[in-house]
């Protein structure tokens, strides 16, 4: 057995940040928290890349989503803090809304994972947006579209990896609650770039895509300095 | 009474549906009582509660039953867009708007074909629809929809937002079949893309959005429909009821991460599911 998270990184998120909600969260997640923690602490000997281990089971999937939401939130915080030149009032309104949603998603996962498996939560990630020109509308909206479309395919692909027992169904519904908002974002951003392209990504059956965690992290890795190890995620 | 048709359709894939309601005679008696005693506007809620009693607890409907439920909704959406594309109301819209409605029409027709393919011989046939929401009378509250682009968009928005909630509500019932679950999620997010764009179109039109609910956004704020259409308002509101919640799995989102998340933002960031019963009650007036 080895720990999923290096000891030095544990406890990055402090419970005091969540104040009075802690009791409710514990009440909700309490029953399976012990099991999940045990599960994520027992590693298989799947080869890893030496990075931050997302863990296994449902907590692994929650950490995976948390990582993506950290990336999106960090991006939109920067976009709103330093708007691109020529930004319209409508675009400012929409991008501020999206920032708020993504911060909400990030903080939701931080709280939920902390409640379910406090020893297994991944730390705050270091991001790298050096490839994005935040003064350029095309660069910012292009990156936003990439992030939103990636998020949609990530959640669509993660649904089937969530367990059917314990809190699994609850997590699946939560993922569903978030992915449709990501899809609303994706459509809006696509329309800002080219009006009418809200669903241009659909396939011959009129379906969106799904991506595996490995596929998603290979793309997201461009923007995340911290190496993430997805080798123990369910498949 | 179209409710009987819905039950009949469900019975094809879930032969025990009547057992879930105690027995067939009781179901029909409940229907009779409903239509006799309740105001029309209250019927959907009563029906939802009846279905909830039957399906609210395990066993969940079989995967095929869920797929046929989805197919029924896709039939509804596809035929709606097939009807409005080229209609007098549609022809008053901009070229961009016409293009968007055509794109959505094409997606919905593809969803119908896809689900029919997946279901094969188990697929339910297309119901007869009454898009006036008149239960077959042709004189329901949306009677003028073919001539009115704003009404078409209001209906489209409600159908898309309801579709998103409907798929979301069935995800856990599909967990036993990973392939089907993923396909359903891949449709679910497309419906959300459609909803996002239709809502932008309605904002651009600035028509029939109640002042207190402006601005209309691509995402759902609280339980606002953003639609002001008194003849069908009660039914429209059912499609948005429950969207206002701000606590997810015991975590209150409001105020998390600094001051970013107001109740409005917290509600927008999470879309909410509807049960099969709730959705069937919403679409009931459109199915003959």
Image (cartoon, coloured by chain):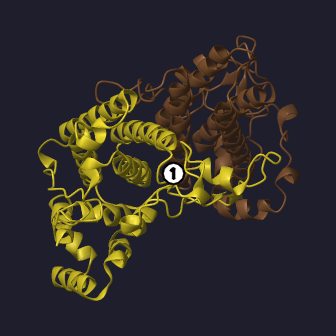
Chain colours: A brown, B yellow
Give the chain of mark 1: A
Quarter of the picture holding the N terminus of chain B: bottom left
Residue B94 image point, x, y percent:
38, 31
Above-or-below relation of B37 to B18: below
- Residue beneath disc 1: A173
Above-or-below relation of A193 to B17: above
Instruction: Name the residue rendered at 72%, 41% in the picture.
Output: A103
**Is residue B115 visible in this depiction of the protein?**
yes
Instruction: Name the residue rendered at 33%, 32% in the picture.
Output: B98
Residue A164 versus residue B47: which sits nearer the camera?
A: B47
Residue B51 versus residue A158: which sits nearer the camera?
A: B51
Give the quadrant of residue A62. top right
Quarter of the picture holding the C terminus of chain B: bottom left
Instruction: Name the residue rendered at 86%, 47% in the picture.
Output: A14
**Is residue A42 visible in this depiction of the protein?**
no
Give the quadrant of residue B46. bottom left
Residue B233 image point, x, y percent:
42, 66
Residue furthest to the top: A131
């Amino acid at each position: 057995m080895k720990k999923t998270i290096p000891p030095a990184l544990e406890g990055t998120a402090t419970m005091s940040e969540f104040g009075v909600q802690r009791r409710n969260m514990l009440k909700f997640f309490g029953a399976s928290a012990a099991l999940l923690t045990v599960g994520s602490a027992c590693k298989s000997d799947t080869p890893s890349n030496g990075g931050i281990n997302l863990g296994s089971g449902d907590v692994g999937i929650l950490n995976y989503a948390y990582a993506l939401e950290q990336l999106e939130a960090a991006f939109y915080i920067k976009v709103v803090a330093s708007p691109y030149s020529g930004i319209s009032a409508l675009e400012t309104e929409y991008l501020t809304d999206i920032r708020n949603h993504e911060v909400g998603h990030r903080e939701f996962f931080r709280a939920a994972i902390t409640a379910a498996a406090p020893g297994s939560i991944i730390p705050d990630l270091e991001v790298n947006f050096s490839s994005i020109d935040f003064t350029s509308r095309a660069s910012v909206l292009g990156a936003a579209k990439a992030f939103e479309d990636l998020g949609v395919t990530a959640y669509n692909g993660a649904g089937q990896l969530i367990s059917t027992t314990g809190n699994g169904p609850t997590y699946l519904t939560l993922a569903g609650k978030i992915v449709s908002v990501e899809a609303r974002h994706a459509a809006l951003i696509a329309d800002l770039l080219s009006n009418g392209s809200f669903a241009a990504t659909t396939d011959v059956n009129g379906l969106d895509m799904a991506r595996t965690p490995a596929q998603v992290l290979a793309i997201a890795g461009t923007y995340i300095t911290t190496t993430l190890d997805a080798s123990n995620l369910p498949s | 009474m179209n409710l009987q048709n819905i039950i009949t359709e469900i019975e094809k894939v879930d032969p025990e549906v009547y057992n879930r309601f105690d027995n067939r005679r009781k179901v029909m008696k409940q229907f009779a009582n409903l239509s006799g005693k309740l105001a029309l506007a209250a019927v959907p809620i009563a029906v939802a509660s009846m279905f909830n009693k039957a399906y609210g607890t395990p066993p969940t409907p079989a995967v095929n039953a869920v797929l046929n439920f989805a197919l029924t909704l896709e039939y509804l959406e596809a035929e709606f867009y097939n009807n409005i594309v080229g209609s007098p109301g549609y022809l008053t819209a901009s070229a961009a708007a016409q293009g968007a409605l055509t794109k959505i029409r094409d997606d919905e027709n593809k969803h119908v074909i896809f689900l029919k393919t997946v279901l094969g011989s188990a697929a339910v046939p297309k119901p007869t629809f009454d898009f006036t929401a008149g239960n077959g009378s042709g004189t329901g509250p949306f009677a003028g929809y073919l001539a009115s682009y704003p009404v078409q968009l209001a209906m489209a928005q409600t159908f898309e937002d309801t579709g998103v909630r409907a798929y979301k509500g069935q995800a856990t019932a599909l967990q036993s079949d990973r392939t089907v679950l993923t396909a359903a999620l891949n449709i679910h997010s497309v419906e959300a893309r459609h909803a996002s764009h239709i809502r932008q179109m309605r904002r651009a039109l600035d028509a029939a959005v109640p002042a207190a609910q402006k601005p209309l956004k691509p995402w759902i704020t609280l339980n606002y429909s953003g639609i002001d259409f008194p003849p069908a308002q009660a039914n429209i509101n059912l499609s948005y009821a429950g969207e206002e919640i701000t606590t997810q799995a015991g975590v209150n989102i409001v105020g998390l991460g600094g001051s970013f998340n107001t109740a409005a933002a917290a509600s927008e960031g999470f879309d909410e599911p509807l049960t099969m019963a709730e959705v069937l009650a919403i679409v009931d007036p459109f199915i003959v």
